[in-house]
Image (cartoon, rainbow, N blue to C red):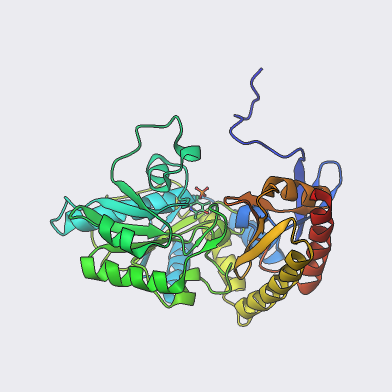
Amino acid sequence: MSPAVMPTYARYDVSLERGEGVYVYGTDGKQYLDFGAGIAVASLGHCHPILVSALKDQAEILWHASNLYNIPVQERLAERLVESSFADTVFFNNSGAEAVEMGFKIIRKYFSNSKCPERYRVISVEGAFHGRSLACIAATRQEKYTAGFGPLMDGFDQVAFGNLNELRAAITAETAGIVIEPIQGEGGIRPVDPNYLRELRQIANEFGILLMFDEVQSGVGRTGKLFAHEHAGVKPDILASAKGLGGGFPIGACLATKEAAAGMTAGSHGSTFGGNPLAMAVGNAVLDVVLADGFLTQVSDVASYFHNGLESLVAKHRHVLRQVRGQGLMIGLQCQRDHQNSNLVQAAMDEGLLSVPAGDNVQRLVPPLVITKKDVDEALLILDRAARRVK
Ligand SMILES: *Cc1c(COP(=O)(O)O)cnc(C)c1O
């Protein structure tokens, strides 16, 4: 008999029913320190009081309004994102894939609007993950996501990770844009060299093409900056945000400069639920916390404490652990070749810590941004026991 929930996920043998701060609880009452945060989503932990009251308050005011009307709470979130980023304008979506897909539409529209409709192709890099829609899997271009869903949508090319010569050589008269995650998430917490990002900006300028950052996972404070690309001092033309922006409420946002978005005029794009007042109220509350004085500094402090602890852990368990990488609280613990990341993730879970496997044999640690050094100490003890278990 087929399960009522379509079995597209290989699920862990645990049923989660409640969360509080950095902890989640199974139906069997077992407590887990949640360093997966629903894959970098519960950015302020579970049921953060500020988010709970924002959602409850909005629920008594207005749940839904069509984008046929002005929605003040949506304008407020857009204005705040614009004020604190490279962007001039924002469209709200419901998920990461939608935000990325909209970025691709903006790229195509930009060129058709400037009388160059023959330029429509987008270059992505190997190991990327851009979401599960047809356009997003065409950009992602990994067999595990595309198998059975062909033919792949036309208009996407892919080059090797970190290879500028190959990227330059791949640009043709049809190329319209480049899409990249400043730190690959699903691909295994692979940070892109800041110099490479700066060079990409140069190349995009030189060829007159658009640069788009997929910060669905790396954004909204995760790396100690509002967006990860700020570390490199490079600005994109378009940026996709989602995951942490809603702190657990479904949301996506596509940010752009006014030049890039010039063709996005009335009627060109739409969404029934995008910019929904409930999501907007929660997004504003997330920014209230993340943009408050000192918050991002605190994220960086606790992150460097965590990185140091993980370095010691790697030194202690050399036979299991290969290296720590990542930035801020977007961390990857790479296993040695003869150990499977999934075994480490399972062992940590058995010991009471949730984490997420990622590509390149990495255990991904993307905890709530509000963790303290005490939470880090607890996580390190659990990871130590987990590493001992898998040897
Ligand atoms: C998760 C993710 C997506 C897709 O987001 P969904 O909300 O699952 O559609 C896209 N890009 C990156 C970098 C992601 O991490």
Residue located at (65% from left, 63% from top): 323
Image vertical order of residue 308 relative to residue 386, above or below: below
Q: On the rendered structure, is 114 left or right of 48?
A: left
- Residue sitting nearer the eye, 49 or 390: 390
Identify the residue at image location x=84%, y=63%. Answer: 381
Using the image, determine if residue 305 lies above or below residue 140: below
Would you identify the image quadrant in which residue 315 lies?
bottom right
Q: Position of residue 299 (x, y in %)?
A: 65, 74
Q: Is residue 175 found left or right of 273 in the rendered image?
A: left
Would you say 49 lies left or right of 281 here?
A: right
Q: Name the foreground residue: 38 vs 74.
A: 38
Position in image of residue 316 (x %, y %): 79, 65
The location of residue 30, given as percent across then percent down, is: 85, 47
Measured from the top left, where is residue 17 in percent x and y? 76, 45
Q: Specify the quadrant of the image occupied by residue 175.
A: bottom left
Extreme residue toward the right, this view: 29
Residue pushed farthest bottom?
Answer: 293
Residue 262 shows up from this direction: yes
Question: Which of the two residues, 158 or 223, is positioned nearer the viewer here?
Answer: 158
Q: Residue at x 76, y 66 (%)?
A: 313
